Image (tube, rainbow, N blue to C red):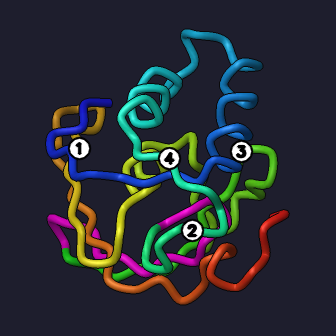
Amino acid sequence: MEIRTRPAITVSERDLERLESMLAGLPDDQPGVDALREELDRAHIAEPETMPPNVVTMNSRIRFVLGPTDREVEMTLVYPRDFAGRPDQLSVAAPAGIAVLGLAVGQDIEWRVPGGQTVRARIVDLPYQPERAGDYML
């Protein structure tokens, strides 16, 4: 996965620890591993209690617009172990999940998917963010 635009991102320290632990247990050649590592390496890290309330964190409910079709979707960003294949779930190991992690409402990101198509996502709302709700253990 090649991310074409790289807006600033913020990741909570707790999410970072859990994601790094998850990555340590995955084979290096698993799709998405390198892209997720790259995103975590460039992220600004914040304490969960000081996370900006408009930033996508793990277990956040996200409303975003996907381009080039401009289709609006609402999904919950989940760890792969919690992904049940429901249409309202987005695994952080999937290209779109990697792309939206750490973005703030109003930010856009583009990435290239296998086959060469460019996909764009713009975060339009964050109906639920665990840190904003005080749910620090999710």
Residue 50 left/right relative to 86: left
Q: Which mark, by number, is residue 45?
A: 4
Tag nearer the camera, 1 or 2: 2
Answer with mark 1 or mark 2, whichever residue precedes in sequence: 2
* Badge 2 density bin: few <14, some 14–19, many ≥20, Cα 10 Å: few
Is there CB contact under 8 Å for labels 2 and 4? Answer: no
Please report the bounds of the magenta region as a residue range.
56-69
> CA–CA distance between discs 1 and 3?
20 Å
Toward the viewer: 27 or 68?
27
Q: Secondary structure at mark 1?
A: strand
Q: Residue at x 36, y 34 (%)?
A: 42
The residues tagged by marks 2 and 3 sit, at their Cα atoms, a distance apart of 26 Å
User: Which residue is the site of mark 2?
Assistant: 50
Mark 3 or mark 4, earlier in chain: 4
Indicate the position of residue 35 as horizontal and vertical percent values. 41, 28
> Circle 2 sits in a helix, a strand or a loop, which is it?
helix
Residue topped by disc 3: 80
Q: Residue at x 58, y 77 (%)?
A: 61
The quadrant of the image that shows the N terminus is top left
